[in-house]
Image: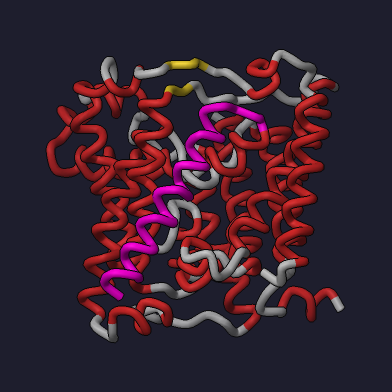
Amino acid sequence: MRRAQGDLVWGLVFGILFGFLLQKGGVTSYDVIIGQLLLTDWTVVKIMLSAVAVGMVGIHLFRQLGWLRFAVKPGSWGRNAVGGLIFGVGFALLGYCPGTIAGAIGAGALDALAGGLAGIVLGAALLAAVYPRIRDGILQWGDFGDLTLPRLVGGHEWLVIVPAVTLIVLLLALLERAGW
Amino acid sequence: MLLEWLTEARWSPYVVGAGIGVLSWFTLLVSGKPLGCSTTFARMAGMLERLVRGRRALEKAYYREYPPTVDWQFMLVMGMVIGAFISARLSGSFQLRLVPETWLAGFGPSGALRVGAAFAGGVLMGFGSRWADGCTSGHGISGAMQLAVSSWISAICFFIGGVIAAYLLFGLLG
């Protein structure tokens, strides 16, 4: 019980930090997110790729030291590609994602509060309603389980991490160079 | 100096990104949980269904997998509202606003139209994120850094779908 309550407090603390960072980054704003989808503002990609690069190095190192465990989500083409594309269409209409909408509400976006929030909850309820019918069907199409890129290419994980981080840094440098 | 920094309206995206990267080390180290948000909306849906339909709602297979309870991630999402509020207030950028600028330029000042579009987009996003088992943070950040194939496919499809739909929306209708 104590442990569970401590967990919840940590969740709240991490959430406050996450929301603070997202708002400082500008990505709780509809204009910044829709600018990314219209390819006129690259803030979202810059934040995500730098988070992935910094995060990737640290969590793999700490896992090797035995300090943490991963939580890799299993998946399939039917689950991730189809669901991802449906998500994308919603992303363009809404202009927030499930995380940034929480931040947008905190920053005063009434369209997020009055429209988006209710929509996301209803959408999740609809998925819960159809779940028994798709669980053993389309969600299993092209199933690959909890595959990771290092296992996919059959190399040591740092043989993926080092090139991945290098690529991300190069890509970000190119974005800056292009003035995006 | 520190106060000035905290009251700035925008930080460099690289500072913010690196900060989120470091934050995700600590959520795994301290709580054993990756940053993620969309499961919380499924739990909210379950809570509402339980309010309307009673305990029968909990028999749904999906809510047995994701019980409608307040967990770590639920508190994370609540914290995000607070954190963004603090940040916006500190910089003076907090503003109650119904119709964002880019939307206004494309589709005019109607609040009902904007809320309707946000609602429709929300439905697709709630449905799609639970279909894909994650969102821009769970797959796009946490899963991608774990080098999960499921997360890279999802994140790439979020943006393929999003870019095509945004161009259609603003190109054809806006």
| Residue at x 53% of width, y 64% of height | A39
Is B150 magenta? The answer is yes
Q: Please tell me whether residue B18 is drawn above or below residue B51 in the rendered image.
A: below
Q: Please tell me whether residue A27 is drawn above or below residue B24 in the rendered image.
A: below
Structure colour scheme? secondary structure
| Residue at x 28% of width, y 86% of height | B109
Locate residue B88 relative to residue B133 in the image: left or right.
Answer: right
Q: Quadrant location of residue A138?
A: top left
Q: Quadrant location of residue A79?
A: top left
- The overriding secondary structure of the stretch rendered in magenta is helix
Q: Nearer the viewer, residue B98 or B159?
A: B159
Q: Quadrant location of residue A136?
A: top left
Q: What span is colored magenta in the figure?
A: B146-174
- Horizontal and vertical percent position of residue A132: 22, 21
Of all residues shown, which one is farthest toward the left?
B53
| Residue at x 55% of width, y 70% of height | A40
Locate residue B111 relative to residue B106 in the image: left or right.
Answer: left
| Residue at x 45% of width, y 46% of height | B158
Q: Nearer the viewer, residue B54 or B18?
A: B18
- Horizontal and vertical percent position of residue B153: 51, 34
Q: Please tell me whether residue B139 is drawn above or below residue B60 in the rendered image.
A: below
Location of the N terminus of chain B by quadrant is bottom right
Is B114 magenta? The answer is no
Locate residue A140 relative to residue A63 in the image: left or right.
Answer: left
- Horizontal and vertical percent position of residue A107: 50, 72
Q: Nearer the viewer, residue A29 or A41?
A: A41
**Number of numbered labels in the structure image:** 0
Location of the C terminus of chain B by quadrant is bottom left
- Horizontal and vertical percent position of residue B73: 51, 41
